[in-house]
């Protein structure tokens, strides 16, 4: 059927921490864990068995500083995880989030100078992070800092170092949203002062969102993204209609947790409500959906047969 969910189009986010045998439940996101890389391998094995072939990795360091050094130093948490996955499961499509907020002591997505994001320094840092992930074997790097020209800067750095084949998924239309609340708890990445409205989009402003998508396409992103998904289905549709470009939608933490809590309370049938939501996102025009529900969806589709 048209608009049926294809498990191969789902991208499952994973939160990686240092250490061994660690699997910490995330309070604000029932069913989702932070895990060390040994547990990660078991998780990937499970995903493979379920038919999920794409993951998006987020690193949560144990140390933070103003320059986000933990994000790009040699053998950083994500490059180690990528190497491990790729050496054991070469066919797994590994995407990595490229941002600073989980690594900076102030929790903002860029390098701060005088209480403001310094675009040039931020682009340099994002490029270093992306290069470290590409060297480790990431298939896609996904800059989410909403820094102007981030895709172009990263593309140039990757090409310059011989990583022409590493692709880029831009978090193109990323709105300043309350729906990221549970994620910030998971990644310990809430800003310590101010908010992200200086660099994330105002949800009243559709034109800027379309412009950001156009910018990312001009800068040679391989996939563009709309985030969050549910309150932005019109944007998803318009981006697909206008650009007809590979498009991901991010069904974010708050959208996930609302559903999970409702299910836990017995208000919804989980399979039915999640399937309805995913179909809506797909129908709006998303080619790929980044979702914490991916494992459940894959599980249900197996049980059908
Ligand atoms: C990092 C980033 C965020 C999310 C993905 N990458 C948080 C934010 O912008 O505060 C949110 C994902 C989610 O809520 O599931 N910039």
Image (cartoon, grey):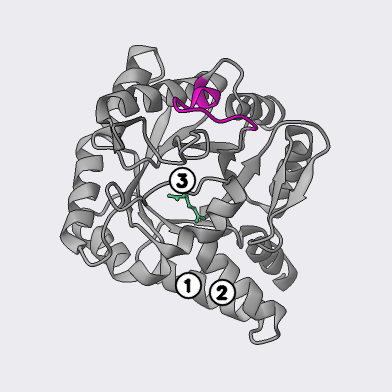
Count neighbours of disc 2 (C-alpha within 10 A) and say few if under 14, some if 14 to 19, many if 20 or more: some
Q: Which residue is mark 1?
A: 279
Q: Residue at x 29, y 70 (%)?
A: 234
Residue 132 position within the rendered picture, expressed as x and y whole percent measured from the top left: 50, 20
Q: In the image, which disc is placed on residue 192? A: 3
At label 1, counting other C-alpha atoms closer than 10 Å, the crowd grade (few under 14, some 14-19, many 20 or more) is some
Label 2, on which residue?
275
Q: Secondary structure at mark 2?
A: helix
How far apart in space, not on screen, are marks 3 and 2 (Cα)?
37 Å
Q: In the rendered structure, are the residues bearing label 3 and label 1 in contact, judged by CB atoms less than 8 Å apart? A: no
Instruction: Give the residue furthest to the bottom.
Output: 267
Q: Nearer the viewer, mark 3 or mark 2?
A: 3
Looking at the image, residue 180 lies above or below residue 143: below
**70 drawn magenta:** yes
Q: Mark 3 or mark 1: which comes first in sequence?
A: 3
Choose the circle earlier in sequence order: 3 or 2: 3
Residue 190: x and y in percent read 49, 49
The local secondary structure at tag 3 comes to loop
Q: Is residue 94 left or right of residue 2?
A: right
- The dominant secondary structure in magenta is loop
- Which residue is drawn at the image coordinates 68% and 36% (left, top)? 17
Count the marks: how many?
Answer: 3
Query: Residues under labels 3 and 1: Cα distance?
Result: 37 Å
Q: Is residue 131 magenta?
A: no
Residues at discs 2 and 1 in contact (Cβ within 8 Å): yes
Q: Nearer the viewer, residue 152 or 244?
A: 152
Magenta region, residue range:
62-72
Foreground label between 3 and 1: 3
Identify the element where label 1 is drawn.
helix
Query: Residue placed at 50% from the left, 74% from the top?
Result: 277
Image position of 268 with respect to 105: above or below? below
């Amino acid at each position: 059927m048209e608009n049926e969910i294809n498990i191969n189009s789902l991208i499952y986010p994973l939160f990686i921490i240092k250490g061994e045998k660690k699997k910490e439940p995330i309070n604000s996101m029932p069913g989702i864990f932070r895990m060390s890389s040994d547990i990660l391998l078991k998780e990937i094995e499970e995903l493979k068995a379920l038919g999920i072939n794409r993951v998006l990795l987020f690193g949560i360091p144990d140390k933070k500083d103003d320059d986000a050094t933990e994000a790009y130093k040699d053998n950083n948490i994500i490059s180690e995880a990528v190497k491990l996955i790729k050496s054991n499961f070469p066919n797994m499509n590994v995407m990595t989030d490229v941002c600073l907020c989980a690594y900076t002591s102030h929790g903002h997505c860029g390098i701060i100078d005088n209480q403001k994001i310094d675009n040039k320094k931020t682009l340099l840092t994002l490029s270093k992070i992306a290069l470290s992930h590409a060297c480790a074997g990431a298939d896609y790097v996904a800059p989410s800092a909403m820094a102007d020209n981030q895709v172009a800067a990263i593309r140039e750095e990757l090409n310059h170092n011989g990583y022409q084949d590493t692709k880029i998924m831009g978090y193109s239309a990323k709105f300043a949203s309350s729906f990221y609340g549970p994620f910030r708890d998971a990644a310990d990445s809430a800003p310590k002062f101010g908010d992200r409205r200086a660099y994330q989009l105002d949800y009243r402003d559709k034109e800027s969102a379309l412009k950001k998508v156009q910018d990312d396409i001009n800068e040679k992103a391989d996939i563009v993204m709309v985030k969050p998904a549910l309150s932005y289905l019109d944007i998803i549709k318009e981006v697909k209609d206008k650009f007809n470009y590979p498009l991901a939608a991010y069904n974010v933490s708050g959208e996930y947790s609302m559903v999970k809590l409702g299910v836990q309370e017995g208000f919804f049938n989980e399979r039915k409500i999640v399937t309805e939501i995913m179909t809506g996102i797909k129908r709006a025009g998303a080619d790929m959906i980044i979702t914490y529900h991916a494992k459940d969806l894959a599980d249900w589709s197996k049980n059908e047969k």
